[in-house]
Image (cartoon, helix red, strand yellow):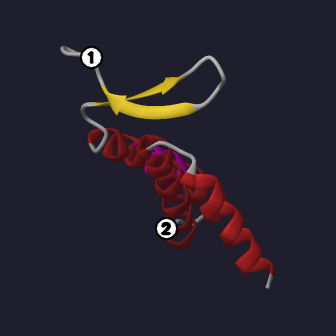
């Protein structure tokens, strides 16, 4: 039950993130899990795998956002729209 609650909170919090942020989070978690499973030292493997996974996930997420910029209006609401020409 606790795992289900944690997964629901994680999924809800990722819904408000950009694709770059989502990619970094998912890549970091996946990299940490794989690193901990295959390394001789699970802690070191998790740290290295998480860092590499987060960077890779952020780059992949950023590549899917081309042409889209995040804006914040004066009331603090965030929205996504096409970027200005040449951006």
Give the percent coordinates (x, y) of residue 34: 49, 67
Q: Main secondary structure of the magenta part?
A: helix
Q: For the image shown, how many numbered marks are present on the structure?
A: 2
Horizontal side of 27 relative to 72 (left or right) equals left
Q: Position of residue 20 (x, y in %)?
A: 43, 41
The percent coordinates of residue 21 (x first, y second) are 50, 43
Using the image, determine if residue 41 lies above or below residue 52: below
| Label placed on residue 84 | 1
**Distance in Å between CA atoms under marks 1 and 2:** 39 Å
Dot 2 crowding, Cα within 10 Å, few <14, some 14–19, many 20+:
some
Label 2 element class? helix
Look at the numbered disc 1 and give the secondary structure of its residue: loop
Residue nearest the observer in this picture, 55 or 60: 60
User: Which residues are the magenta region?
Assistant: 49-55
Residue in the image at 48% along x and 24% along y? 71
When asked about the image quadrant of residue 87, the answer is top left
Residue behind mark 2: 34
- Does 15 sit above or below residue 62? below
Q: Earlier in the sequence, mark 1 or mark 2?
A: 2
| 48 vs 74, nearest the viewer | 74
């Amino acid at each position: 039950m606790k795992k289900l609650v944690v997964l629901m909170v994680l999924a809800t919090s990722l819904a408000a993130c950009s694709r770059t942020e989502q990619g970094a989070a998912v890549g970091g978690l996946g990299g940490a899990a794989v690193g901990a499973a295959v390394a001789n030292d699970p802690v070191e493997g998790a740290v290295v795998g998480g860092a590499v996974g987060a960077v890779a996930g952020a780059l992949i997420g950023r590549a899917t956002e081309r042409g889209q910029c995040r804006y914040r209006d004066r009331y603090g609401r965030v929205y996504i729209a096409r970027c200005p020409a040449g951006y």
